[in-house]
Image (cartoon, rainbow, N blue to C red):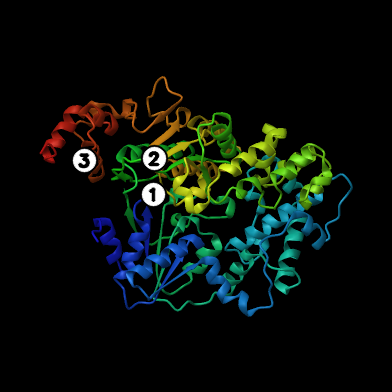
Amino acid sequence: MQLTDEQRCITSHEGNLKVNAVAGSGKTTTIMQYALQRPKASILYLAFNKSVKLEAENKLSQLGLTNVKVETAHSLAYKYTAPYSRYKIRFDYKPHELVSILKIPFKANDLSHLKLASHVYLFVRYFCNSKAKKVLELNYLETLTNLESLEFATEHYESIVYYTRIMLAKMHKGEIEIIHDFYLKQFQLQNPILPYDYILFDEGQDASGTMLESFMNQPAIKIIIGDQHQQIYGWRFATNALQQIDFDTMDLSKSFRFNQEVARLSKSILNLKVEINQPNKANIIGLGNNSGIKSRVTLARSNSKLVSRAIELLIQQKELKKIYFEGQLSSYTFSEDGGSIYDVLNLYNNQRHMIKDDLIKTMPSFDHLKDYLEETSDTSLKALVDLVEKYHKDIPFFIHKIKECTVDEADKDKADMIFSTVHKAKGMEYDEVFLMDDFISEQQIIDSKPAIKAKEISAEAISEEINLLYVGATRVKSKLHIPIHLLPSSYHIKNHTSVTTDLNLSLRSKKRTAKPQRSNQYWSRTEEAELKQLFIQGKTVKEIALLLGRSQSAVIRRVEKLDLWF
C-alpha cells in the first residue's frame, strides 16, 4: 500500500520512538506496516482496550502476520499474575460493602461513612494506577477537582489513608477479592521482563503511571504512539505519557478523516490552551474529501445531556424513528455502581420499597443522595439524578419509548441518529457530527484562570476539557455542527446559534497577523500543504488568505510558484 512520507520514516526507524499522531492519521495502519517490515522479530502490540485488541488481531490475521502478539495492559498483567495466585477477582466494590468489610463506624442519618468509603475506593484505584510503590508516596487530594469533595477528603484524610492501606493489605493477603487494577499493580511491582524484541504501545496518551512504568522497564525496542490532545481519561488516572517520554519523536500530522476546514478549527480549539499556559503544539493537515452522509451522531460531554437530547428529538419533536446508543443504552441509565434511573426516581418519589440498589437504599432521602454526590466523585450517578430532577414522573414513559426505538449493534447503520458521549466515541468516526452545548467554551476557560491561580482547580483539568471538545470535533468525516458559543473567538460568524463546516468558517483577522506583516514571510511546508488542500477544495483566494492570515497577493504568488493553476 502507498504510505505517506511520515509513515515511511516511522516504519523504517530503528530504536525507541515516540509518535505524535493526530486524529484520523492512520495510526493502526502505521503500526501494522511497522510490524510487516519486521517479519522475523518477536513483537508485542499493546492495545488500549479489548475492542481495539480484537480489531488489531483481525487485521494482523488478514496480513498473515504471526509474529505479533496483541494484548491490553490488563490482559498482559493478568496472565503474569492472577492465574498463578490465590486471588479471586471482582469488578468493583460498592461504598456500603466497604463500610462493612473495613468496619468503618457510622452514625444514624449521617452519610459520612459512605462518603469515606467512596474516597477510599478511589484512592485504592489511584494507587494501583500510579507508579508509586507505597501509598504514602501519593497525595490523593491532588486528584480531586470538586470543591465539596476536596473539603470532605481534606477533613477526613488520615482516615482515608488508613482504610486505603487496610483494603490494599486485605487484597494482597487474599482476604477479600481483588479488583482488576490490583493485579495490574502487582505486575508493575514484580517487574517481569517480557520476551519480545519490540513493544508497540498504542494510545500512549492514555497510559496510567503503572502501565508506563512497566513499559519503560522493558529492554525491548519501544514504540509509543498517540495524540497528547486526545488524553481524556484523567479521571481514570491517565498520565499523558507522550509528554513524559524522552524518545526520538516523529509526527503523523495528516488526517485522512476530515478536510482542512475541520483541521483548521481543531487547531484553533487546541490553541485555547494558551490561555492556561498548557502545551498546545499541534500540526494538523486535513486530507479528507468525504461528502456522503450515511452515519449521523449526536455527541455530548455528559450522559444526562445526551439522554435529554434523545428524548427531545425522538419523543418531543418526533424527528427520529430509529436510534442507537454507543456502548448500549443501559450504560446511560445505570450508574457505575449499579443503581438504575428507576431507583433514583423511586427515591425521589419516596417509594423506598421499590428501590433495588443497596447504596440508594441507604439514602434517607433524595436530598441526602444529592449531598452524598456533592462530596464524592460518582458522576454517573449524578447524571441519573439530573435526569430525574428534569423529567421526574415522565421518566418511565421516556425510557420505554427510547428502548422501543433503539436498534441493536448489528443494525447500527440503520439508525437515523447515533447518540454517544465523547468518551464512548473515542476512536470512532461518523459522516455527520452534531456537538451538544455542554463542552467547555473559550469564555469558561478565561473565567477559570483565577481559580487555577488560587489552586482551586488544576490547569490540567481545564486542558482535558479542551481535549474533549477537540476529540468531539475530530470524529467527523464530512459535516460538523457546532454551537456558536463553542467556536474560538478567532472565528467570525454572525446571526447563527450553531454553524456547520459547509458555511465556509472564516477566521477573524488579528492585528498581529495583518496582511502587510506576513506578505513576505517564509512559507513553511505545513502552510504550503494547507494552501494546496484549500485550493483543491475550491476555496477562493480571498477565503484562503483569511484562513492562512496572508495577503491575497501572497497567496496568488505561492499558488503560481506551486503550479496549482494547472
> Mark 2 or mark 3: which comes first in sequence?
2
What residue appears at the point 64 percent right and 37 percent down from the top-left corner? 398
Secondary structure of residue under mark 1: loop
Q: Position of residue 232 (x, y in %)?
A: 51, 49
Q: Amino acid at mark 2?
A: Ser
- How many neighbours does mark 3 have within 10 angstroms: few (below 14), some (14-19), or many (20 or more)? some
Q: Position of residue 284 (x, y in %)?
A: 33, 45
- Mark 2 in CB contact with mark 3 (< 8 angstroms): no
Query: Can I make out residue 15 in this image?
Result: no
Q: CA distance from mark 2 to mark 3?
A: 18 Å
Find disc 1 in the rendering and name its residue: 23
Q: Amino acid at mark 3?
A: Lys
Q: Is residue 25 above or below residue 314?
A: below
Front in this rendered view, residue 270 or 292: 292
Q: Amino acid at mark 1?
A: Ala
Quadrant of res 345: top right
- Mark 1 in CB contact with mark 2 (< 8 angstroms): yes
Label annotation for residue 532: 3
Q: Position of residue 383 (x, y in %)?
A: 65, 41
What residue appears at the point 35 percent right and 39 percent down from the top-left corner? 262
Find disc 2 in the rendering and name its residue: 266
Q: Is residue 45 above or below residue 315?
A: below
